[in-house]
Amino acid sequence: MNEFHFIKTLFTCFVHCYKKLDLAIFLFNFAMKIIEKNVDKATSLLTHPKQYCSSLNEYRRFVTREVKVGSIGIGGSNPIRLQSMTTTDTMNTLATVEQSIRMIEAGCELVRITAPSINEAKNLQNIKDELRKRGYQTPLIADIHFTPNAAEAAARIVEKVRVNPGNYADKKRFEELEYTDATYNAELDRIRERFTPLVKICKEYGTAMRIGTNHGSLSDRIMSRYGDSPEGMVESALEFLRICEDLNYHNIVLSMKSSNPKVMVQAYRLLLNRMIETSRNYPLHLGVTEAGEGEDGRIKSAAGIGTLLEDGLGDTVRVSLTEDPEFEIPVAHNLVKRYATRKAVSRIQDLIIPTNFSPFDYKKRTSHQVLNIGGSDSGQQVPRVIADFSTASQITAASFFAVGYTYSPTLDKWNISDQACDFVYTGDRQIEFGLPGTLSIIQNASAWETAPGKDKHYPLFSASEFINATNTHAVLNFVTVDVDHPYTALIQKIASSKNVVLVAQTHSEHGMAAQRSLFFELLNAEATTPVIIQRLYDNVTQDDFQLFASTDAGALLIDGFGEGLWMHSEGLNRQLINSTVFGALQATRTRISKTEYISCPSCGRTLFDLQETTAKIRSRTNHLKGVKIGIMGCIVNGPGEMADADYGYVGSGPGKITLYKGREVVTKSIAAEQAVDALIQLIQDHGDWVEPKLD
């Protein structure tokens, strides 16, 4: 029993023994002595029932038990491990070996291979032997769905098996069933009977296991009781975990994966909360499943995985891209490298989690509306985007192409894209030409005061400038708050102001936590001032900016914080910056500006060329703003992930495709050659099709 639960037990005893005064006093005094020695931990226990990490205030990695996977340790004091999964046919030994080597040489520390049947499971021995023969000792993981006999065979060969509790031994027909307590428990007994042999084999052979819940493949039984929820995801894993623990098997890693970063983050946090409550400390495998390809896949992965890494969670990472697996590893490496040397330096000593904030449920922070920023309920505005042109060598009409605007001199007309920024910050500079009607200018307060015209021009004050200002804008004033320094006095001053928007600025390495602390203080003060999240990055590459900005902004947006984003890195292409910002908003479902593709990363189960098909579907549908299309290589997660997609395109046999509307099958076994056309027709039939605009 750790200190948390020991203290909790003492207080429980005190409550039950309050009539026996001497005993009650003894227990109370004993508990207080422990609390004096463990102030931080005790305070966390008694005032933070929403706890899911070691600290919300500073970077502190959650310490787990170590799980050995061959020679590799996961969790404990080990670094965050990188892994990926082969996409080859597992029965093709040579192709799988060659791809595994490419992954390993890219930095992959654990290689996962699908084993959809016992034949593939047995062939893992040939793959392992060939890799060892070539001098590669990297541990192998068998990925199992539906087939306990394959898992049992694989567990005798490889160093780790992954099982999905939603489809390992459970019923999954996507039916709404009613379970009594008796029938529910009878199903648990059946699962125990099916799962126990695998656990015993893993114990005997020293094989590790990942119990990996997928949002898209929760069983009918779990869905009947918990619904399509993070709570259902957590309970699905805990049911299997309890069986392992009853058999004294603990060499386990846990995961809670979803294609929706919000759901994924909430599920992991809830899992940690349950582990802390029950004195468990299993390592975590992090991943956003079906993240997609290219920029979208990277941004969505960063928003989900990075949010958890920021809070010290995660012991091994897989980035699931619809690309060759060796390209996943550099992305994973760039995501986790920030945390290898991050120090635990606390800034706010008295952080109080607001009573009206839950890390396990999404709720947009209430703010009042200032012009077109903020708002609540039906009047809530989408987060606004600010582009930084303060250091541009020149600002011309053509410059605005990078942030979503194109100007035609011939027609004297602006065209505005769905990813057009809302404000441009120009520092002390003035704009000498007419702007499109949807775009406004932010200037330093001194430049704003001397601007020749103030129509749609708004001032940016420092905190001290605003406190002493004699001239402010009647409608909208931006005020910078440095969250790395005390700001309570500023919040008290502007709390009643209805024409102020805060710009939350940080220079801290762990700036996300510092900015989150500001939002907590606003919630505790019941202040509804809108806040723009600002991060300026120095000396970062294009790839790093994309991942870091998506992590830092995504972590706050997922918690319902932020009425706008201002992200910049001098020297980087402004079009890339703008695209990244809108991508982070899309990934967190806070502002939709394009089609969303939920496409799996492919594996040996995939029944068609996923990359080629995804590109083909994208080329014909990427103008359908707000439409979500799931592209799945096989049935494993297909129907389940369709719950998060409007339309689904799923491999159902060699050369055959099944189309879905949501979770419902519309057409089965369409020839792959006609399937994309049939998907377009399905979208048209349901009224979601619009013709693409001609340039």
Image (cartoon, helix red, strand yellow):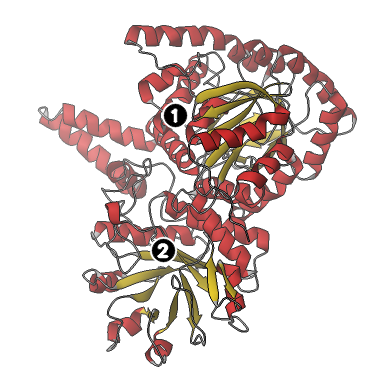
Question: Count of labels shown?
Answer: 2
Quarter that holds the C terminus: bottom right
Q: Position of residue 465 (x, y in %)?
A: 34, 84
Quarter that holds the N terminus: top left
Image quadrant assignment for residue 76: top right
Nearest to the observer: residue 474 or residue 303: 474
Identify the residue position indicated by label 2 in the image: 347
Foreground disc of the pair 2, 1: 1
Q: Classify 10 Å Cα crowding around label 1: few (below 14), some (14-19), many (20 and above).
A: many
Residue drawn where x is 71% and y is 28% of the image: 672
Amino acid found under the numbered disc labelled 1: Val
Q: Classify 10 Å Cα crowding around label 2: few (below 14), some (14-19), many (20 and above).
A: some
Identify the residue position indicated by label 1 in the image: 234
Q: CA distance from mark 2 to mark 1?
A: 33 Å
The answer to whether residue 598 of the structure is visible from this angle is: yes
Nearest to the observer: residue 27 or residue 474: 474
Q: Position of residue 663 (x, y in %)?
A: 49, 26
Relative to residue 619, is residue 641 depicted above or below? above
Dot 2: element:
loop
Amino acid found under the numbered disc labelled 2: Arg
Q: Position of residue 388 (x, y in %)?
A: 53, 74
Residue drawn where x is 65% and y is 69% of the image: 573
The answer to whether mark 2 and mark 1 are in CB contact below 8 A is no
